[in-house]
Amino acid sequence: MNSVTTETKNPLGYESIGRLIGKFALPCVISLIVNALYNIVDQIFIGRGVGYLGNGATNVVFPITVITLAIALLIGDGGAAYLSLKLGEDKPEEARRGVGNTITMAFVLAIVLFLKETKKMNSQKASTRSFFVRI
């Protein structure tokens, strides 16, 4: 039997810039619009269900969520870029070590942040802790 091999060329090398922007940026923009609409609808439901204190609580936590996401993307995308560079240089052992370092850094950061927040929660006064449990 004859085996047929098909070569696929990278569209980044020959496609027009406008077509590439439409192909890669448009899904990203749609994703951002859907996420923004989700946040707006979520705030409407929280405002009607819980009230202004619920809206205030979610608005206080939202920047913390964005910062956490930024740190996660920093580590994850950096590790992915390093992996791609090393695989492109045909250095699979360095790529493997880089991915291992990325995963280790993510776990260590998660443990450090968890312990820090646990210590902060344990040092709170009992009255404050019971207030948050009631909410």
Image (cartoon, rainbow, N blue to C red):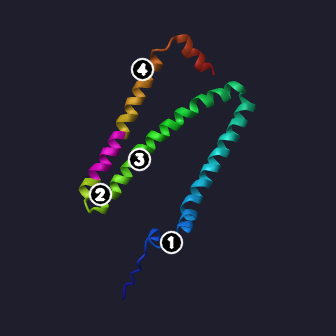
Find out whether the residues at labels 2 and 1 contact each other: C-beta distance under 8 Å: no
Identify the residue shown where x is 72% and y is 31%: 47
102 within the magenta span: yes
Badge 3: few (under 14), some or many (20 or more) residues near its Cα, within 10 Å?
some
Amino acid carrying mark 1 in the image? Glu
Instruction: Find out whether the residues at labels 3 and 4 contact each other: C-beta distance under 8 Å.
Output: no
Q: CA distance from mark 3 to mark 4?
A: 27 Å
Circle nearer the N terminus (3, 2): 3
Q: CA distance from mark 2 to mark 1?
A: 26 Å
Mark 2 or 1, closer to the camera: 1
- Residue at numbered disc 4: 119
Residue placed under numbered mark 1 in the picture:
15
Q: Amino acid at mark 2?
A: Lys
- Upstream in sequence: badge 2 or badge 4: 2
Q: Name the residue beneath numbered marker 3.
A: 76
Residue position for label 2: 86
Please name whichever residue, 126 or 112, is drawn nearer the observer in this view of the structure: 112
Helix, strand or loop at mark 3:
helix
84 in relation to 98, above or below: below
